[in-house]
Amino acid sequence: MERNQIIISPEKIREQYVYMDKVRALLGERMQKVHYAYVETFGCQQNEADSERIMGMLENMGYTPTQDAALSDIIIVNTCAVREHAELRALSITGQFKHLKEKKKSLIIGVCGCMVSQEHRKEDIKNKYPYINFLFGTSMNWKLPEILYNSMIKQKRQYHLDCGDIGNIAEDLPIRRESGFKAWVSVMYGCNNFCTYCVVPYVRGRERSRDPERILDEIRELAKDGYREITLLGQNVNSYGKDLEIDYDFADLLEDICKIDGDFIVRFMTSHPKDASRKLIDTMARSPKIAKAFHLPLQSGSDRILKEMNRHYDRETYLSLVGYMRERMPDIAITTDIIVGFPGETEEDFEQTLDMLETVGYDNIYSFIYSKRRGTKASLMEDQIPEEIKKERFARMIEKQSAISSGKNSVYLGSVQKVLVEGRSKTDPDKLTGRNEKNRLVHFVGDDSLIGKFANVRITEAETFSLSGELEK
Ligand code: SAH
Ligand code: SF4
C-alpha cells in the first residue's frame, strides 16, 4: 500500500474543519448557551490518546468538556476489545446512558473504539441499542465532525466502520490533553504480529508509522508548553519506521527526540521482545532524557506456550535481552505483561512462568486472565482452561509478584528520588503523589504548587506497590 493512500490528505482534514464549523453553527442556533460533552474511555493508553483527539474536536465544535455524563449533550464511549470484561463494561455503561436519553431526547450518543470495530459487536449495538446515534471504528476517529453533523441533520443512525485491514494516519486534528504536564504521543498505529490470543490486529489494522517530522514537531511544541513527561505509544514501537520510505528506526527517533530542548523525560510502550534491538538499548543507556524503565511483555514463561502464542522468541532470547539491558543500565526497572490460562497451559507451563518472575526479577507485572476473543486462532484451540484453574493460577502469580515487588521497593529506602508530582493521593489526600523515573508511585507531604513539577523526595517507607518519603528542601 502506497503511503499517500494511508495518510489522510490535508484536503480531507480541511473538510473536517468545515464540518466542525457547521456543527458549531448548528449549536449556535439553539437557545441553550452551553453544550456539554462527555467522553468515557476504556482500555489502553492508545484509547486515552484517541479520546483526547475526540474531545479536542468536540471542543472545537463548540462543546464544553464535562466529567458528568448526566449534564451532557453528547456522550462518546470509546471502547476496548482486548478482554471480554472490558467489552461487557462498555456495553453496560452504554446501557446505562439510555436513561439519560429518556430524560433528554436531544442527547447524542456515539460509540467508537476497538469493540465496535468487530462485526458481531456492531450488529449487537445496531440491534440492541437503538438509541445510539452513531458508531465509528478506530480508523474513523478523524471523521467525527462529519459523522456528527450528518447525524444532527439527517436524524438517521450512522455507521462508519469500514476501516478495513489497512488503517490510516490522520494529522493536524485538534487535541484536548487531559494533563498539562504528561502527554501521550502516538508514533505508530496498528499491529502486524497476530499473536494468537489477541484481537488488536483485527481492530486496529496494519502497522503504520507517523512521519518523524510530525512527531518531532508535536514534541517540540509539548516541550515549549512545559510538558514534563512524554510517552510514545505504539503496539510494537520497535517496528517504527519499517514502512517509511527512509532508513529510520525507533532508536533514531528517540535519539532525535532527546535533542529537543526542555526539562522532560521520555517513556515508550510497548516493545515486543522479538524486535527490541541492542541499538535501542544502547540509545537508552546514553540518553539521560529517556526513563530507565522498560516494559517488555513476556506473556508466558513456557517455550511451548510462547510458540502457540506466535510470539517468535523463547526464554533464552528473552533472558539474553534482559541481560543486555542490565549490563548497559544496571538499575533499569523492568515490567511485563503475563497471560494466565492460555489454552493448553499445564501446571508445568505455568510454573515456568512463575520461575521467570523470579529469574528476571520484575519491578512490576500486569497479569491478565486469558480471555477468548472471537476471530483469533487461540479461540479455536482445544483445551481451553477452566475458569477456576485460571483464577487459582492468577492468584498464585499475584502473590509471588507481590513479594518480588516488595523486595524491589525496599532498595529505595534512604535514597532521594526525582518524582514528577501528579496530584493529591486518592487514598491519603494529605499527601501528594507522583512517580519516579522507574514509574514507582511515591507519596509525600507537600504543597499543591508542586503539582506538574519535578520534586526530590527522600524515601522513608517502602510498601508493596508504592513508596513514601519526605520532600527534600
Ligand atoms: N501490543 C502490546 C499490548 C497489547 S494488549 C504488546 O504486544 O505487548 C495489552 C496486553 O493485554 C497484552 O500484552 C496481553 O498481555 C493482554 N492480552 C491481549 N489479549 C489478551 C487476551 N485475549 N486475554 C487476556 N489478555 C490479553
Ligand atoms: Fe496483540 Fe501481539 Fe500485536 Fe501486541 S504484538 S497488539 S499482543 S498481536
Image: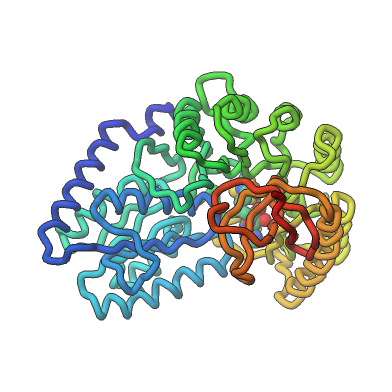
**Residue at horizontal 44 percent and vertical 71 percent from the top:** 91
Q: Residue extending furthest front? A: 473
Q: Is residue 242 visible?
A: no
Residue at 74 percent of width and 63 percent of height? 465
State the image quarter where residue 346 is shown.
bottom right
The N terminus lies in which quarter of the figure? top left
Residue drawn 67% across the image and 41% down it: 271
| Left or right, 261 with reference to 78 | right
Asked if residue 49 lies left or right of residue 353, the reply is: left
Q: Is residue 201 above or below residue 28?
A: above
- Residue 164 place in picture, x, y as percent: 42, 45
Residue 24 visible in rendering: yes
Give the x, y percent position of residue 397. 80, 66
Q: Is residue 314 left or right of residue 175?
A: right
- Residue drawn at (39%, 49%), measured in percent from left and top? 176
Residue 21, horizontal then vertical, whole percent? 19, 46
